[in-house]
Image: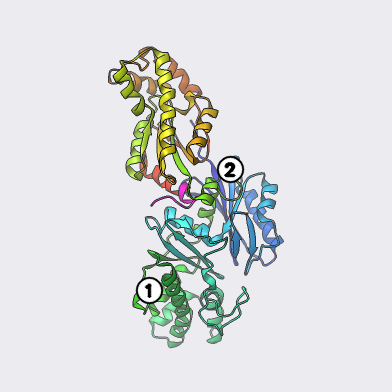
Amino acid sequence: MQDVMPLSIGIDIGGTNLRAARVSGTGEILKRVSEKSAPDPELVLGRIADMVRLLDTPDVKAIGVGVPGRVDARRGAVLSGGYVNLASVALAQRLEDMTGKPVIIDNDCNMALAAEMALGAGRGQDNIVMFTIGTGIGGAVAQGRRITRGSATAGQLGHITVDVDGEVCACGRRGCVETTSSGTALGRHIARAGLGADISVDQLFARNAAGDIQARGILEAWARPLRAAIDTAVAVLDPDMVLLGGGLGRAAHTALGRAPALAPWYQCPVKPAQLGDDAGVIGAGLQALAMEPGTGPLPRLAQSGHARRAVLVNGIPASGKSTVSRGIADRMGWPLLALDTIKNPFLEVLGGGDREFNRTLGRASYQAIWSAVGEAPTGSTFVIDAWFGFQPREVLEDHLRKAGVEQTVEIWCHAPGEVLAERYGARLDQRPAGHPGAAYIPELIELAKRAEPLRRGPLFDVDTTKPIDFDAITAWLRAVMAARLDVPG
């Protein structure tokens, strides 16, 4: 069976570069393209459309776009921008019209932080503040692994004031840290020192190491306001970690060595982001894959934050789904509910029965699973082990609705019919009376030829004839759920 994992296109709009990539469900970049950015929003939109055409394939299911400036992700609207202002362009709607595919937009730093939480330096951390240092300075905040949005656009850390009498910022105020510690600001510091515009930040570090006082002054002028902004964010938000990302994130982290935190109350680890310039496109791609059809620009779970979630480990009997389910539950710490776990005690106590009784008991056990999920605290995540094709799809949808499950992801387990027959036959004497016997094996072989996954939400394909890569499965789960911004690390 071919890999049915859907793909997405992630787009990162920057003041200098436009980046786009075809992204897998595990966050792997399969193909990338880039263009130069521009201040003209129509020109930017045209270049984005060109990049999408180069990346689009039938497997691409959705598009995610990280946009600089203030973005209301819930409404899919750009409110304002700085170096690239797309507020005048109905970006999401026009991209959807061009491509015929759903589009999700969010602030570019929010996208980058989602990627770092899923795959990068933010893994395992609950509360993170992130600054992205590039043409401007972006910001994002995660609390309890959920992006903090306020009424719409919280996290604009580039507009923390560090000098009330400083440079005028694109936002209209003076002395924002973006005016002192961005890449653009570094260029101004270099020019004011009388150095050539072609000098790089690496050359500044080399000169500083050689004792060049002028280079040291430039780096300190660039880093000290950033340290003040970081200390302010730490004082207000008390994060576990501050990440520095963007094209100059690692350089800024190095420069902060010249500007250590001084206030004893506001100490916090500051680390460079791991995904570099790829964070924006990866995060945008993962958020796009997490969007279910018809849910609008932002997935419903990310809006409510209270819905239950279910990992549907799907496959016909003997497909290996029980092994996969247990492995996921053990590694992720989520409770496991399996159809046979509920059904088998009843078969043992009641003494088994015919095939029709087994089916009836299966339907009752299926209902019991969703009743248990519905009684769990909101925000709970369950691993559900079942062959979901044994009942009509509308039965599942009704159970999910009644149980308050708004997010599902699917793990599809499969193997050739002959393999399933051998597995099923080998364990006949281990199953309680009431389960179908050896006469079921020819039916199982035929079922393997036509069985299909649900394809309800993000999908991960597992060929259980091969060693099961639980690291890949759990990384994918963290990625697609972190893209909805509230998965535990």
Q: Which image quadrant for residue 18?
A: bottom right
The colour scheme of the drawn protein is rainbow
When the figure is inspected, residue 21 is found, relative to residue 392, above or below; the finding is: below
Q: Please provide percent x and percent y for residue 181.
A: 51, 76
The type of residue carrying mark 2 is Lys
Could you say which disc has been placed on residue 210 in the image? none
Q: Nearer the viewer, residue 277 or 359?
A: 359
Range covered by the magenta-colored residues: 481-489
Q: Please provide percent x and percent y for residue 44.
A: 67, 60
**Callout 1: few (<14), some (14-19), or many (20+) C-alpha neighbours within 10 Å?**
some
Q: Nearer the viewer, residue 247 or 473?
A: 473
Could you say which disc has been placed on residue 61 in the image? 2
When the figure is inspected, residue 231 is found, relative to residue 396, above or below; the finding is: below
The type of residue carrying mark 1 is Tyr
Q: Residue at x 46, y 87 (%)?
A: 214
Q: Residue at x 58, y 82 (%)?
A: 167
Element marked by disc 2: strand
Q: Please provide percent x and percent y for residue 202.
A: 45, 74
Mark 1 vs 2: CB contact within 8 A: no
**Callout 2: few (<14), some (14-19), or many (20+) C-alpha neighbours within 10 Å?**
many
Look at the image and tell me whether residue 439 can be seen: yes
Q: Which residue is mark 1?
A: 266
Look at the image and tell me whether residue 459 can be seen: no
When the figure is inspected, residue 97 is found, relative to residue 402, above or below; the finding is: below
Look at the image and say whether residue 426 sits in the magenta stretch. Answer: no
Q: Nearer the viewer, residue 382 or 66?
A: 382
Q: Residue at x 46, y 68 (%)?
A: 249
Q: Measure the C-alpha gap from mark 1 to mark 2.
A: 44 Å
Q: Which image quadrant for residue 100?
A: top right
Secondary structure predominantly adopted by residues drawn in magenta: loop
Q: Is residue 357 left or right of residue 42?
A: left
